Image (cartoon, grey):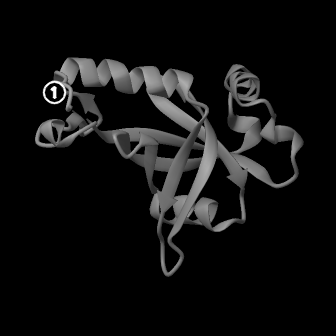
Amino acid sequence: MTEPARSTAQRRTDALNRLEKDKDLWVATAAGDAPTLVPLSFLWSDPVLYVATVRTNPTAVNIVESGRARLVLGHTRDVVLIDASGELVENADLPAEQAQAYATKCGWDPRESSGYRFFRLEPRGIECWRELNEHADRQVMSDGRWLA
């Protein structure tokens, strides 16, 4: 049986809960002829996310070239879909408290791994839904602003 549709405010709360508690998400990028989809650990530091990956891999290259990424939390019956702007953050430019928070949450410190860099991802749009009854009103953020 399908649960009643959640309000926009409740879906925002649920999305924020996932952003704060989940450790991994899917990152999709594309630039040129190199679309990618990879799981990465992340830190939510309201209002942005940080991920880390090897600077030369296709995901990193795509973020640098396009300045965009699509992020997904959850599973197919509880989706948080995020369209984000993205940029490279050199390790020395990331505030120490952010880097340490990432290391604590994710269980490793990218600054200690050769070639890894951080990427700052700022949500521009967020959609959340569980079942078809939430699909029509799935948007909870637009143009970087929460709708509830």
Please state the horizontal and vertical placement of residue 31, each as a whole percent of the image: 48, 72
Q: Residue placed farthest to the bottom in the image?
A: 33
Would residue 148 be visible to someone looking at this image? no
The residue nearer to you, when weighing 147 against 39, is: 39
Q: Is residue 3 above or below residue 81?
A: above
Q: Is residue 98 left or right of residue 67?
A: right
Q: Is residue 14 above or below residue 115?
A: above
Task: Report helix, strand or loop for mark 1.
Answer: loop
User: Which quarter of the rendered picture does the N terminus lie within?
Assistant: top left
x 40%, y 46%: residue:
84
Please state the horizontal and vertical placement of residue 140, each as a whole percent of the image: 23, 32
Q: Residue placed farthest to the front in the image?
A: 1
Q: Is residue 19 above or below residue 136?
A: above
Q: Is residue 134 left or right of residue 18?
A: left
Mark 1 surroundings: few (<14), some (14-19) or many (≥20) residues within 10 A: some
x 69%, y 22%: residue:
101
Q: In this figure, which residue is indicated by the disc labeled 1?
A: 5
User: Which quarter of the rendered picture does the C terminus lie within?
Assistant: top left
Instruction: Give the residue type that dot 1 points to.
Output: Ala
Please state the horizontal and vertical placement of residue 145, each as a whole percent of the image: 25, 30
The residue nearer to you, when weighing 97 against 113, is: 113
x 36%, y 40%: residue:
79
Q: Is residue 136 left or right of residue 73?
A: left
The residue nearer to you, when weighing 70 against 135, is: 135
